[in-house]
Image (spheres, rainbow, N blue to C red):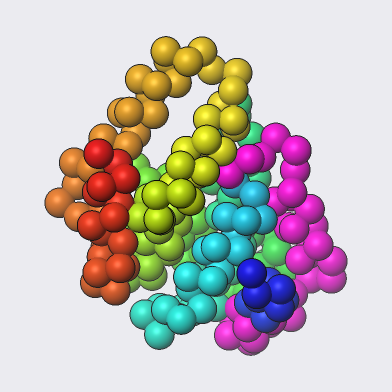
Amino acid sequence: MDEGLPARSWQRAWAALGLRAPDGLIQRLLDAWAEPQRRYHTQQHLRECLALLEPALDLAQHPGEVELALWFHDAVYDPQGKGNEARSADWACEALAQAGADSEAQQRVRALIMATCHDAEPMDQDARLLVDIDLAILGADPARFAEYDAQVREEYRWVPGWMYRRKRKEVLARFLAREAIYGTERFKERFEAQAGANLR
C-alpha cells in the first residue's frame, strides 16, 4: 500500500478547495476510522477509496469536494446506530465552515456524503463517481470480496445469523437488480462483470 497516499490526498483536497485544513483534523479523522467497532469501515476502506480516486480525479467536476467527501463518508460509524451518514456530513460541514468554505461547497459535500446511503442511484456526476468508488469493493477479486463479506459480518456480529443472512441478501439483491451497479463508464468497464459474479 502507498504509505504517502493519505497525506497526499489530504493536501490535494484542501488545495483544490483553496482552503487550509483545520489543525489536527486529519489525525482526528484517522483516529475515527480506527475505532474498535469497525472491521470493514476502517482505514483499509478509506485507503482503498483514495487509491481508486487518485487516477479518476479527471472525472470529477469538483475534485476537492469529492476527495474530502471520501475522507468523511464513514467518519462516524456505529453499526448499531442510525444516521451515520448524516452525522458524518455534519462533521464535514463543520470542518469546511471552520476553514472558511462557502455554503454552496458545504452543501455539495453534504449531498455527496449522503449519496453513500445508497438508497437511490445518483444523478450528479460527482455523486456517481463517489458512489462508484464506495461500491468498487463489490467488484473486487474473489479473495478481497470474501474478506469484505467476513468483515461486514463481524461488524454486525450482534445480529442473529438467520436475520443477518436475510437482510444482507436483500441489500446485495438491490444492487444486482439495478440496470448497472456503476454509474461511470470507467468503473463499469473495470468492475461491473466481477461485481455481478461476486453478488450472484
Q: Relative to 199, does residue 66 appear above or below in the rendering?
A: below
Residue 54 visible: yes
In the image, 12 versus 82, the foreground residue is 12
Q: Which residues are magenta?
A: 11-40
Q: Relative to 63, does residue 194 appear above or below in the rendering?
A: above
Furthest-right residue in this view: 24
Question: Could you tell whether 155 is left or right of 193 in the image?
Answer: right
Furthest-left residue in this view: 179
Quadrant where the N terminus is found in the figure: bottom right
Question: Image quarter for residue 6?
Answer: bottom right
In the image, 111 versus 81, the foreground residue is 81
Image position, residue 77 (x, y; %): 63, 41
Question: Could you tell whether 54 is left or right of 138 in the image?
Answer: right
At 60% from the left and 18% from the top, the residue drawn is 158
Image position, residue 151 (x, y; %): 56, 38
At 75% from the left and 38% from the top, the residue drawn is 36
Q: Is residue 132 magenta?
A: no
Residue 116 visible: no
In the image, 114 versus 29, the foreground residue is 29
At 55% from the left and 63% from the top, the residue drawn is 48
Image position, residue 116 (x, y; %): 44, 51
At 37% from the left and 61% from the top, the residue drawn is 132
Q: Is residue 30 magenta?
A: yes
In the image, 144 versus 195, the foreground residue is 144
